[in-house]
Image (cartoon, rainbow, N blue to C red):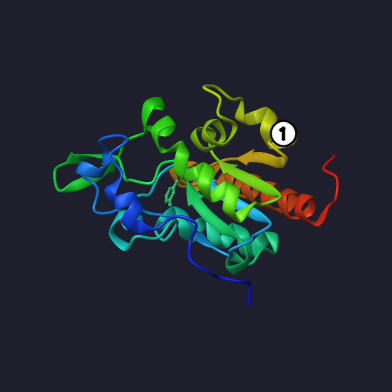
Amino acid sequence: MPERKKPPISRTELNECRRCALWRNATQGVPGEGAAHARIMLVGEQPGTQEDLQGSPFVGPAGHLLDEALGKAGLDRDKLFMTNAVKHFKFEWRGKRRLHKSPAQQEIEACNLWLERELEQVNPKVVVALGATAARAVLGRKSVTLGEMMDTPVEHEGRLVIATYHPSFALRQRSDEARTAAFERIVRSLRAAARLARGGEET
Ligand code: URA
């Protein structure tokens, strides 16, 4: 079994965080979870409604799709570390439903301290950014071109960072064809991450 110790950041610390206002409406902060010294870290955007309620990353519909993609890429979730760029759920009420709202740059920056701590302690060799928000947060840049980063890993602070679609992007596609194409692209990126973590070159 991969070594599991105290997560790099605790829920209590996140619940006490006042660096931005997202704590006000969220149920709780959602820290990253996974193997203490995972070679691969997956970074999403922010918790969704299920993650907010359950307190763990990627346990809702996007997480289920991600699990499927991990399985297809031959990666074991228990050996990875999963987290988000922003640790509180940002949403707006639509009737009785809480609809996801994208975090603002200021909120991403305010939360970066927690992501940095996770990166420092887990010290992964490869970081997979799921979507543009995650890529911006990991690289500390205001804009990134997802397309370029999907094909070419970027070296950043001693790690390899690759990007791929966020699983929610695949879920949002209207046609089966587009959904399958996005899903397969995620699988391809996860396979590339596995190769990079083993020390193989990406071509
Ligand atoms: N979307 C994310 O980016 N992260 C989660 O944990 C769940 C959904």
Looking at the rendered structure, the kind of residue marked 1 is Val
SS category of the residue bearing label 1:
strand
Q: Where is residue 168 drawn, in percent x and y?
A: 46, 45
Instruction: Report whether residue 101 is seen.
Output: yes
Horizontal side, residue 158 vs residue 65: left or right: right
Residue placed most toward the observer, 50 or 188: 50
Residue placed most toward the observer, 119 or 184: 119
Q: Residue at x 35, y 57 (%)?
A: 11
Label 1 C-beta lies within 8 Å of the nearest ligand 1 atom: no
Horizontal side, residue 99 vs residue 109: left or right: left
Quick one: which residue is furthest to the left in this view? 95
Q: Where is residue 62 drawn, in percent x and y?
A: 45, 53
Which quarter of the picture shows residue 70?
Answer: bottom right
Residue placed most toward the observer, 153 or 168: 153
Residue at image mark 1: 154
Q: Where is residue 132 drawn, in percent x and y?
A: 53, 32
The local crowd at label 1, few if under 14, some if 14 to 19, many if 20 or more residues have their Cα within 10 Å, is: some
Residue 74 sits above or below residue 177 on the image: below
Quadrant location of the N terminus? Answer: bottom right
Q: Where is residue 188 drawn, in percent x and y?
A: 70, 48
Q: Residue at x 53, y 46 (%)?
A: 43
Callout count: 1
Instruction: Report whether residue 173 is seen.
Output: no
Q: Residue at x 44, y 55 (%)?
A: 9
Quick one: which residue is furthest to the top in this view? 143
Which quarter of the picture shows residue 203?
Answer: top right
